Image (tube, helix red, strand yellow):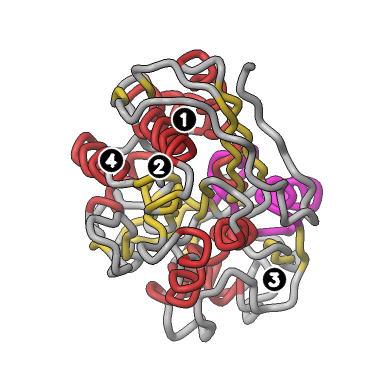
Amino acid sequence: MAASLTLAACGNDDPTANAEGGSGSEDSSAEEGGSEEMSGDVLASGASSQEAAMTAWIAGYSEVQPEVTLQYNSVGSGAGRENLIAGASDFVGSDAYLDEEEREAVKESCGEGGALHIPVYISPVAVPYNLPGVDNLQLSADTLAQIMNQDITTWNDPAIAEDNPDAELPDTEITVVHRSDDSGTTENFMEYLSAAAPDSWPHEADAAWPVPAEAAAQNTGVIQVINDNEGTIGYADASVVTGQSAAVGVGEEFVDFSPEAAAKVVDASEPADTGVEGDMALELARDTTESGAYPIVLVSYHIACTSYDDPERANLVKDVLTYVVSEEGQQAAADAAGSAPISADTREKALALIDTIQGG
């Protein structure tokens, strides 16, 4: 059966229960997924930021393992993590790693070892806007934070003018557009604002947006509202941006988003302490001043159990994850979503971590 992508409506936070597993082998190839033929079903859910990449991974994996059905419900990072905790997904995509409370709760479905994080998708979080006649908008961290906190409310505000001395800025009112659903993209964006502009952004990072404004579901919904309405600005995974986007201040320069600029931030970041040996969750360097680095970046993870009750289920999950982090899988995501492929060193660590997943 060919693998397929299942997209859930924004209000549907619970995919169906786990599908029955098939037979398989623990041996796997880093370049092409499983080296042994496998069959069965794998159900994943989570971050909408991974939607384009997951479409590519599902298509590529179906060529490697045509008898495995891989499904992904794009319900958002928060709902995905809830599904893993509830045992409703075999693994999940998330733009944020499990917090302390979630790491404890997930032991109910994943066992005492809890869950592990594998970085599979590196992408900038863009700052899309809609302002005809202003095609190269530049925003310092403080100015962007004040806009998002609605302390700056018109496009010709002196702070925006200072960042854009050559632009003809209109007196149009600014409409901020944010995610209506709990979102890892939101959390990543807020982490940047908190780190880079602490005096202008008084809110703690969270999956829910704290300032009342225009809301839309998932990344694609945010982009649709911005593209359809002049004077808007928001944030979204760069893979879905189809119009204008702002360059952000880094040190003494303004940097446009790109996979390469996002990867520079990841390389400068430190591992987070999740209590799982070899885990690959990261504390991102949001306040970097490195030249050419784009600091608003998300590292989206695949989060899987460290152990599964069913050995065949464990083998299927390991096989899928091995394909995703392979050179072939990462290039497929880069071609489809414009993401930055993980480095060879990250791939080696990821394969070693995947190999620790137990079954039975």
Q: Which residue is mark 4?
A: 355
Disc 2 packing (10 Å; few <14; some 14–19; many ≥20): many
The reply to whether residue 224 is visible in this rendering is: yes
Element type at mark 2? strand
- Mark 4 or 3: in front is 4
With 235 as the anchor, is 346 left or right in this view?
left
Circle 3: residue type: Thr
The answer to whether mark 4 and mark 1 are in CB contact below 8 A is no
Q: Amino acid at mark 2?
A: Val
Asked if residue 131 is positioned above or below residue 23 in the image, the reply reads: below
Q: Are discs 3 and 2 less than 8 Å apart at CB?
A: no
In 3D space, how far apart are the residues under numbered discs 3 and 2 (Cα atoms)?
38 Å
Circle 3 sits on which residue?
154
Circle 2 is placed at which residue position?
120
Give the residue drawn at x 47%, y 30%: 333
- The residue that disc 1 covers is 333
Q: Whole-Å distance between the Cαs marked 4 and 1? A: 22 Å
Crowding near the residue tagged with mark 3, few <14, some 14–19, many ≥20 C-alpha atoms within 10 Å: some
Element on which disc 1 rests: helix
* Magenta residue check for 237: yes
| Gap in angstroms between the C-alphas marked 2 and 1 | 9 Å
